[in-house]
Every structure is written in C-alpha cells, then in structure tokens.
Image (cartoon, rainbow, N blue to C red):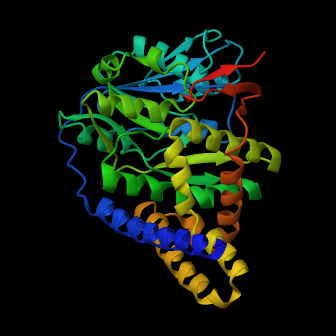
Amino acid sequence: MLALILLILVAGSLVYCVLIVVAAWRYVSVRRPEANWMPPISVLKPLAGVDEGLADNLRSFFEQEYPEFEILFAVRDPSDPALKVVDALCREFPGVVARLIVTGEPPYPNAKVYSLGRMTEEARHELLVMSDSDIRVTRDMLQIISAEFQDDGVALATCPYRAVPGPSPWSTLEAIGLNTEFLGGVLVARMLDGMKFAIGPTIAARKKALERIGGFDRLKDYLAEDFVMGKLVAESGGGVILSSYVIEHRIGSQPFSANLRHRLRWNRSTRRSRPWGYVGQVFTNPLPLALLLVAAQPAWLKILAITVLFRAAAAIAVAAWVLRDPLTRRLWWLIPVQDIASFLVWLAGFFGNRIVWRGRKYYLEADGTFELEE
C-alpha cells in the first residue's frame, strides 16, 4: 500500500514537471512590450541594517536610465547604519531625486509594511516600484516595468527573481532551490489559473490599486504581505501579471542555523497563507518521492531514472530558459542535495507556529496573520 501511494505521488510529480516545462515555454514566448510609455515612477526601498552588497544593490537603482523617477528610503531608527550608504550614494548621484523617511517603531508586527505605507504616503507618483534592499537590477529595469503598465488593465506586476548567494554553502543550496524549484510553481499557477498572487522581492503597482484594497493598513498583520497584496488586488478586479523582467535577489551568506530558521519561516508562512496549496507542494518533490519509492520497492529503480530526467527537464526550463542562471549551470550536481533538503524542510513546515524574523519571535495565526511574542 505504501509503495502504491508513493507511485501515485511520483506519477503526479512527473506530470508537474511536464507542466513546468510547458509553463516556462509559454512565459518566455510572450513578447516583451515596447517601452513607449514612461510615466514618472516612485521607487520605495525599506531598509534595516547593511545587507551584504547593499551599496551595489542600491546603486543599480540610482543608475536607472529613465526620464523621471524618485527613490524613497525608510528606516526605523536615525542611527541605522544603512543611512551612511544612502548618503554616500546621494552624493555620488546628485541628479537623482532621493528622500529619506525615519518611521520610528512600527505600531504592528510587519515593519516592512509600515515602511511601505509611510513611503507611499510621501510618494509623488502614481506608479510605485517596491523593492527590497537585497535586489540588484540592470539600468533598463524601470523602462521594462513601465512598458508593462501601458495596458490600463494591469494593476500590479510581480517580478521573478534569480537568486545569487554569498559564499555560504547553505545559501548556495537555497539559491539552487529558488532557481530550479520555486519559480516553477509560480509559472504553473500562472498557466493554470492566472496570476492571483504576488511574490515579494520586487512588486510594481498603481497607487489607486492599493487604495482600492484598503492600502497597506489591510496588509499590516500578515507575514506574507506580498502574496496577500497580489491576492487582494486580483480579487478587487485589478490585473496581476508576472513581469518579463527578472531581478537579481542577492540572498547573501548565512550559517546553517540562520538559513534553517529562514527556510522554516518561509514554509510556515506559506502553510498559513495557502494551506491546501502547501499540501499540494508534495508534487514539487519528484526526486525525494522517487527515492522513497525505490527504498520501498527496489525493483522499481527504473522509475528513479525516469524521474531524474523529468526533474532535469523542469530545472533546465526554469533556470536556463527563464532565469538564465549561471549558478545552476555550474553547480547542477547540487540539485538532488537541495531537493532532499527542501523536502525535509517542507515536512518540518507542517509543525510549529512560531518564527524568528530579524531577531524577534512571532506567533503565526491560522489565517496567516502574525503577532509579536512578548
């Protein structure tokens, strides 16, 4: 009976691999719109401390080849060391309009949402690009994003990302997973049901679309505010798209314990945000499932070989076709290791309701909201 159940799960995961290949092909086949419309843009950057490579990450936004844009930064504390980096870049690029907001301590759990809300109030332009501090882009990023908003029906665009790790082996494994596994699920969801959610590192949105869902005050209690933002915009009738622009997510270096806490936070948050979707992620683990099947029925070794081929095809479709990721091309042999690690963390995500985020402990509620523990 166990072998039969595993066989069904492996079969489902192979179908999922095929769906990834088809979804990736459909994504890359869409022609990028011409940049004929360039409205002014407000770039919102919440900051907290100095991330690895922060200066170069922020510099890539100062270097945008775009006619009119402003960059707003937000920190909690005027003594935040990130301010020195911002000040140096403002002197380096005196022609770029840049402003700083010191928010103070947030009145609710999600400090990022509070910072985004404060910056949105101060933003001068209708089109907003919200981007984390660990994101690096090319000089044409704003041109490409603005072109996608030429369609009045587009209310929000969420950017796929290529993870770039630091020297830590644990961050390297995580980046391999992000670049070969995570985006595959996004692409399949886009193909089967359309974009009814957003993914967080960089999101562009119209102010009026955010106002229609109740603004950032509506998102203040959610840990996965990016997912909920896209969901609410879609439910309000606004068009949500997966942008054609791929950003670089510089995930930095983390030791094993910090990386594990980070992964658990992500998985537990996902389980609360979309519980049935989290259960369905069992099909995103073809190699671990096939290994368990062979352990139960050694005579079915051929199924493992077939699974390897299907998993390789799905990884190529995402990492090579969509992300053009040099890391996966160089370290492809780490994919099985990462898949096993990801499967184990996924299982662990079913247990526990507490997370650690930026040194603080939070409790996750069943509806995806969270609160600070005393």
Q: Is residue 222 above or below residue 54?
A: above
Q: Quadrant of the N terminus?
A: bottom right
Of 190 and 132, nearer the camera is 190
Residue 146 shows in this picture: yes
User: Camera-side residue: 170 or 42?
Assistant: 170
Picture quadrant where residue 54 is located: top right
87 or 278: nearer the eye?
A: 278
Pinpoint residue 283: horizontal percent, then vertical percent: 53, 62
Residue 215, placed above or below residue 344 = above
Expressed as whole percent of the image width and height from the top left, the position of residue 125 reads: 31, 19
How many numbered discs sit on the rendered protein? 0
Q: Residue at x 66, y 20 (%)?
A: 371
Whole-percent x, y for residue 208 in the image: 28, 20
- Left or right: residue 67 versus residue 10 is left
Extreme-front residue of the structure: 1
Classify residue 173 by image quadrant.
Answer: bottom right
Q: Is residue 331 visible?
A: no
Taking 256 as reference, is 348 left or right? left
Q: Residue at x 71, y 25 (%)?
A: 362
Which quarter of the rendered picture does the C terminus lie within?
Answer: top right
Taking the spot 20% from the left edge, 48% from the top edge, the residue there is 34
Along the viewing direction, whichever of 146 and 53 lies nearer the viewer: 146
Residue 145 placement (x, y as % from top left): 32, 40
Q: Using the image, determine if residue 298 lies above or below residue 348.
A: below
Look at 48% across and 29% down and name the residue there.
93
